[in-house]
Amino acid sequence: MMAEYLPALLAAWGVQLVGVMSPGPSVALLLGVGTAQGARAALLTCAGIASASLVLSVATVLGLTVIFAQLAEAMVMLKLVGAAYLAWLAWGAVRRAVTLPPLPAPVATRATATRLARRGFLLQVSNPKAILFWIAIASLGGLAGAPWPVILIFVAGAFLNSFLGHAAWGLVFAAPPMRRAYLSGRRWVEGALAGFFAFASFKLLTTRI
């Protein structure tokens, strides 16, 4: 059974990995979290991002991403939500660049951990770039009508693909040399992140998807 569906699984995971490894809003978020708060905070954010990927993979299997892509009103709403969230992230980076508040304490409470994971989840689940990659995966076909064991393997693989790929970014940004660079030029890094999120928000609003 697995041999029959293995090419489709590998193709879907390959497209997803291209999306994971290509820089975008989630990578920019991990840059800010990893350099400012360290590896554990970055990995918690990755868990949220991967959870959103799990939701999107289930939606893809159910055919919801294709249906969503065909509804103009839904795509407009997606753009507005994604742009608003990116603008909110830009505003947060602007405030940090201007005020330079004390760095967040190391992750020590469940509330802090939940907040980091939720932030990653909300960014990824409202990220049109990620959703467009899942629409591309749906267009490949090959998994339609697959038995449940294959679907479960696909969904689990999508979660691991997202978590491990984003964790690679997060751990690079949390490495001591990157953190030292952030501390020495914190205002400039936050300013650059603010500019990136603001530009991404503007492009999302003005680009047809």
Image: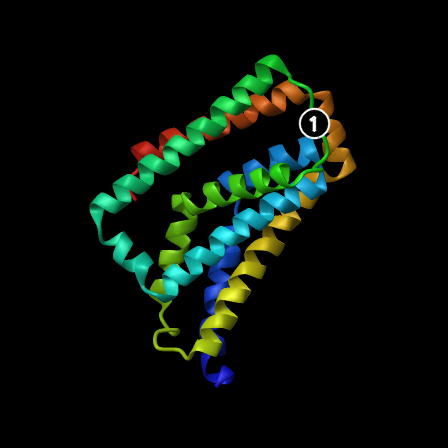
Quarter residue 34 falls in: top right
Q: Nearer the viewer, residue 6 or 122?
A: 122
118 horizontally vs 133: left or right: right
- Numbered disc 1: secondary structure: helix
Within 10 Å of disc 1 (Cα), the crowding (few <14, some 14-19, many 20+) is: many
Q: Residue at x 48, y 54 (%)?
A: 53
Quarter residue 101 falls in: top right
The answer to whether one can see residue 193 in this image is yes
**According to the image, what is the colour scheme of the structure?**
rainbow
Q: Nearer the viewer, residue 39 or 129?
A: 39
Q: Nearer the viewer, residue 146 or 129?
A: 146
In x, y percent, where is residue 83?
A: 37, 33
In x, y percent, where is residue 28?
A: 55, 36
Quarter residue 187 falls in: top right
Q: Residue furthest top?
A: 99
Is residue 74 shown above or below 64? Answer: above
Q: Residue at x 52, y 53 (%)?
A: 51
The amino acid type of the residue labelled 1 equals Tyr
Q: Residue at x 30, y 44 (%)?
A: 209
